Image: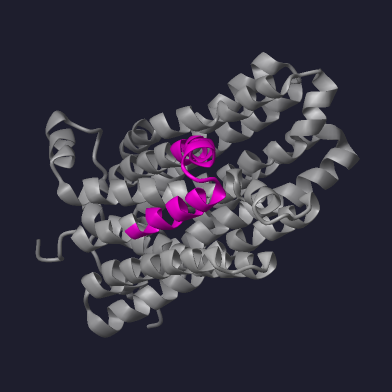
């Protein structure tokens, strides 16, 4: 009997949710100047409105994971998709207070995407394929971000920005209806899964945990592996956010590029990160099947990739041609992208029944890192040596992350 392929439909579902979520999340920035001019906002007001997403998103990771453990992946992810879609439509109201509140609500609703998505992959994929699934999941997040800018610019021209946000709300609602109808929390309960696919998935079903007890929270807080994974996630997110915040300015001021050219070249590291996520999962799973060692296939591969990333960033320091320097940095970001599936697969292995909670805690720490590095950059420019200091700090971040992967406990521990 050949195994059925329901697990791949589950993967397509969570990947499309990731793409939709990141698409609507990043669809605001390309329309910002049009919205600001239309409503007569200041840059400070507009910046406050856009930043309203991030703190609720970070702080609601754990509550969103706890709710998903209580009501199940199927209903939780569908609920979150409906809520972030309604929040997207709220931008069409065209009033600063309502738009800021909608942006914050979007952050609350999307907080559950990563922990619930990782939990779904942990239930539906065998250990030897979890990195591949995770690579696709992270790749579709970045793909949604990349598509958002050109499509938003086109729709703002054709529909107006209010109509665009209403249009952006529709796919999430349709996806939620499909997911709630088709998905099941456990493969054994799905009518499209046969016995051969259940044997292939292999591991026993992960039981839902009804909320975090005091003892559960205490055991998580005392787990050194979780602390180390949080630390490396803080650092890697801080490095990645450089491209969404200051990289174009770096190219303009330190490399003398024109605005349009710098904008196009900024997409190269992001595309490289997507490619790293997809291929890194395949490579890591192939290593696991060959060596039967998570220490080699997950931790060893992540550490090596991060050190290569840092080496390439430092190499770009000495490259005079600005386009070639961006290519070298993009090669480094390919290596950084390779770590994403290694990280998610490690979470699934270490987290067990608490995978969603582990993912929520680490993702929260990652968002704190993403919020911190853009603030550090102006200080480095003004007081620590200009853009050279920023590039040095950028590379050093990945060296520290590699050291943390080295310190992670072995499989036996």
Q: Position of residue 258 (x, y in %)?
A: 78, 53
Q: Can residue 210 be seen in this view?
A: yes
187 relative to 383 in the view: left or right: left
Residue 17 x %, y %: 55, 49
Query: Which residue is at a point 36% across and 74% down the rendered structure image?
Result: 284
Residue for point 62% across, 29% down? 50
Instruction: Name the main secondary structure of what is drawn in magenta.
Output: helix
- Pick the quarter of the image with the C terminus: bottom left
- Residue in the picture at 86% in, 34% down: 160
Foreground residue, 199 or 405?
405
Membership of 45 in magenta stretch: no
The answer to which of 132 and 51 lies nearer the viewer is 51
Residue 332 or 128: which is nearer the viewer? Answer: 332
Q: Give the range drawn in magenta.
A: 371-399
Q: Residue at x 43, y 45 (%)?
A: 74
Image spot of residue 96 (x, y percent): 70, 17
In the rendered image of this protein, does residue 407 appear above or below residue 72? below
Horizontal arrangement in the rendering, residue 206 relative to residue 121 (left or right): left
Give residue 303's position: percent from left, percent from top: 31, 66
Is residue 386 highlighted in magenta? Answer: yes
């Amino acid at each position: 009997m050949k195994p059925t392929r329901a697990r791949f439909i589950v993967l397509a579902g969570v990947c499309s949710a990731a793409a939709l979520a990141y698409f609507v999340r990043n669809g605001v920035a390309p329309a910002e100047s049009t919205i600001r001019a239309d409503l007569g906002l200041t840059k400070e007001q507009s910046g406050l409105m856009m930043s309203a997403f991030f703190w609720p998103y970070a702080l609601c990771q754990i509550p969103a994971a706890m709710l998903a453990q209580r009501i199940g992946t199927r209903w939780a992810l569908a609920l979150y998709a409906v809520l972030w879609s309604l929040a997207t439509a709220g931008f069409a109201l065209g009033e600063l207070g309502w738009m800021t509140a909608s942006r914050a609500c979007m952050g609350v609703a999307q907080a559950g995407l990563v922990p619930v998505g990782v939990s779904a992959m942990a239930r539906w994929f065998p250990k030897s394929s979890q990195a591949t699934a995770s690579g696709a999941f992270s790749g579709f997040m970045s793909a949604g971000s990349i598509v958002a800018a050109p499509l938003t610019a086109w729709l703002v021209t054709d529909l107006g920005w209010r109509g665009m946000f209403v249009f952006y709300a529709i796919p999430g609602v349709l996806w939620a209806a499909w997911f709630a109808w088709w998905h099941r929390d456990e493969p054994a309960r799905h009518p499209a899964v046969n016995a051969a696919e259940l044997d292939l998935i292999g591991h026993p079903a992960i039981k839902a945990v009804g909320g975090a007890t005091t003892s559960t929270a205490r055991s998580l807080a005392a787990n050194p592996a979780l602390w180390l994974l949080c630390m490396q996630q803080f650092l890697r997110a801080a490095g990645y956010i450089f491209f969404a915040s200051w990289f174009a300015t770096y190219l303009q001021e330190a490399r003398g590029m024109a605005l349009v050219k710098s904008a196009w070249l900024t997409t190269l590291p992001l595309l490289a990160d997507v490619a790293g996520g997809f291929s890194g999962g395949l490579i890591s799973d192939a290593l696991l099947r060959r060596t039967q060692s998570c220490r080699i296939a997950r931790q060893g591969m992540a550490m090596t990739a991060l050190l290569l990333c840092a080496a390439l960033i430092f190499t770009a320091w000495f490259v005079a041609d600005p386009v070639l320097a961006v290519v070298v940095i993009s090669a480094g970001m390919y290596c950084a992208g390779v770590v994403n599936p290694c990280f998610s697969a490690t979470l699934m292995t270490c987290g067990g029944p608490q995978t969603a909670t582990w993912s929520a805690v680490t993702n929260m720490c990652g968002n704190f890192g993403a919020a911190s590095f853009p603030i550090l950059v102006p200080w480095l420019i003004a007081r620590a040596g200009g853009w050279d200091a920023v590039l040095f700090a950028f590379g050093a971040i990945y060296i520290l992350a590699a050291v943390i992967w080295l310190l992670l406990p072995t499989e036996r521990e």
